[in-house]
Amino acid sequence: KRLFSSLCPLAMRSGSLASVRLCSPPTCSVMHRQGLVDTAIEHLMIRKDFHSAFDTCEKGLDSLAASDAQDETCSRYGDLKEALCIVGIQALAELNQWQDVFPWVLQHYGETEKIPAKIMQLCILLYTKVAEQSAMQESVRSWLRCFSNMSQSGFSSVAELYILHVLLPLDQTAEAEELLEDEVGQVAFTEDQRQTALTIMKSHGAKAEPLSHPNTQPDPVEAEMVFKPQGSLARRLNAIMKLLYRGLSMASIIVSSHSLRRVVMLLFLLYLILVRMDPALPFAYPWILRLYGLFQQMRNAMFGPYYRVFS
């Protein structure tokens, strides 16, 4: 299953694949890691070599893990790590190894609460694409409850995706309403957005309620039609009438098609003889003979025996 086409727009909007911000002049190690990001993108988007793209991301992440504590405090460290993880996620998706995506991300970040908002959005969309959003429910719930994540720019987008693509498809409307009413909803949404979301959830619940209580009693008319016995004679007559109807329909179609072709040919010959040429000319004789033959065929079809219709 190809998933890159649906995940690529989010990654490109995030800006992590396009550039990595530097908080100071780049050193040799930073330039090397930036080159790994560019190489991984080239393998992924140009060469379509997804194994090489993922291996390059692993190499870059291992290099970042071996850096000192001073580098980890700089924003370039987080941007490089985020960019490598985004490319690695899409490479795994192209390799149809989507079940390994979130464990792999968690392996490099250690805790769910430390994962950036852009990567959480990408994981939600990926697991929604394969209809396995339940695997992300607990992780996204704990991520949204973390107070430090509420200051991220993509916090509201994660909350929106969690409600629309995880809770509602799983019919978890009670948790969605609770999320909108507590601190998460207050931070992530405005009052108008919260009211709109509540309206959507109410309509979703109204649609799901009739499906949960289907009408098991058959309609009296349908029951009478189902259980009404039919004798063997009635069934035979019904089959004979159907065959007769089909035969007459096919015959009428054939007759009408033949008659239509003859009428068109007759009109065309009349047009040629009366408008485009002089009937007194010698080369008009074959056309006149052909017109006479068509008249005879039409007369036989209309007034002669039925076998002449197909001659």
Image (tube, grey):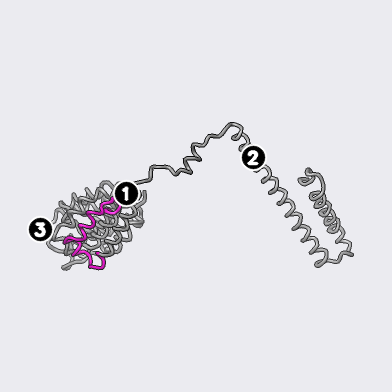
Location of residue 170 in the rendering, given as x and y in whole percent from the top left corner: 28, 50
Q: Nearer the viewer, residue 297 or 158?
A: 297
Callout 2: 10 Å neighbours few (<14), some, many (20+)?
few
Residue 61 showing in the rendered view: yes
> Which region is colored magenta?
166-194
Q: Quadrant of residue 236?
A: top right
Q: Amino acid at mark 1?
A: Ala
Mark 2, mark 1: which one is toward the viewer?
A: 2
Q: Identity of the amino acid at label 3? A: Ala
Quarter holding the C terminus? top right
Q: Position of residue 245 (x, y in %)?
A: 65, 43
Q: How many marks?
A: 3
Q: From where the camera sits, is residue 32 visible?
A: no
Is 235 or 127 nearer to us in this picture?
235
Q: Position of residue 65 (x, y in %)?
A: 15, 53
Residue behind mark 2: 241
How far is the residue under mark 3 from the one under mark 2?
89 Å
Is 195 located above or below residue 6 in the figure?
below
Looking at the image, tell me whether mark 3 or mark 2 is earlier in sequence order.
3
Q: Which mark is residue 131?
A: 1
Q: Amino acid at mark 2?
A: Met
Q: CA distance from mark 2 to mark 1?
A: 50 Å
